[in-house]
Amino acid sequence: MLKVGVWELDVGLKSALTVVSCEVPETAVDALFELLDSDAFTPTSWSDVETKVSRVSVFLEDAAQAGTVRNALVEAGRLIGLSLAPETSALARSDWAESWKRFFHVEKVSPRVVVRPSWEAHDADPSERVITLDPGLSFGTGKHATTQACLRFLDALAAEDAGRSVMDMGCGSGILAIGASLLGFSRVQGFDNDPDCIRVSNENAALNGVSIPFFLDDLSHPQPPSDVVVANILAPVLIAFAVPVAASVAAGPRARLVVSGILDEQYADVRAAYEARGFREVESLLIENWRSGLFRRA
């Protein structure tokens, strides 16, 4: 879904990243993210569980972009009634690489799926399917509510019928496709419109010992039909591209569509867009303020 940019964590290439950041009330983060142009840059946020204050940051390779990012943050804040004061700083890549380790730990996200950062050991139960990730700066760590909901749906669908094929639309770090493969689905593939995401997805697949075709593509046209299509994107994109997404789902009673990346208040519009194309909701999951849906053909 909301993927952050991916950079080589090689200090020899460049010594630092430029960071533009500001403090935002935790309850305002989702609205702020919706207003920011995710095609130009993508933010991350870390929340303090005690103060309920989040730090929103944008990591840039090109320091010249900092002014544009600061202006965008200020304007997005103004639209939701906040007066933001973004700060610019430099962060050594080695510091960034290490900083991820403070936030990501082994987590069981569904009855069988466990997400394990590569630097932590986990004594897995025989029934568990462990996804090992070295996230670096790529989106898709299993921490976000939308990723967790998709993995829960995939776990349940695999238990029901793992003989189905799976397409991961907007693969990001490859976590959903890797999870599907480890759960035993018969044929799994994924695509993204960002070449860096394809590279990271391939690296993570190799780390997990699975072979998954990841390819560069977008949502402008249907894909060859798959039995299970997972689209963990944003609500406006899911609505705008409902026709090709729906057309990528195979015919028949075994077919399922998972849509995610949707704020709860946006879900009714997404559901209506797919009901208009012959789908009906089987189930929805609300985690935090994000709702994800499982659909079948009516």
Image: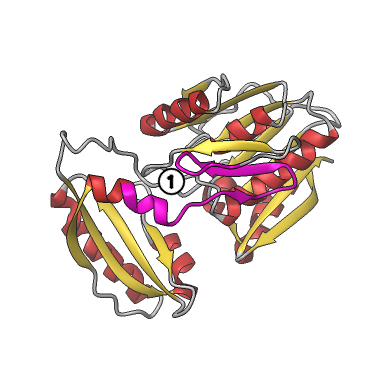
Q: Is residue 225 above or below residue 17?
A: above
- The crowding category of the residue bearing disc 1, from other C-alpha atoms within 10 Å (few below 14, some 14 to 19, many at least 20), is many
Going by the image, does 118 lie left or right of 158?
Answer: left
Amino acid at the residue labelled 1: Lys
Q: Is residue 175 above or below residue 213?
A: below
Query: Residue beneath label 1, please?
Result: 3
Q: For residue 22: magenta?
A: no
Task: Please identify the quadrant where the C terminus is shown.
Answer: top right
Q: Which scheme is used to colour this image of the protein?
A: secondary structure
The residue at 58%/46% (across/down) is: 238
- Rendering quarter of residue 257: top right
x and y, in percent, of residue 46 in the image:
41, 63
Q: Is residue 132 above or below residue 287?
A: above
x and y, in percent, of residue 156 in the image:
78, 42
The residue at 71%/38% (across/down) is: 128
- Rendering quarter of residue 246: top right
Q: Which residues are magenta?
A: 98-122
In the depicted view, which residue is nearer to us: 5 or 260? Answer: 5
The residue at 56%/35% (across/down) is: 169
In the depicted view, which residue is nearer to us: 59 or 126? Answer: 126
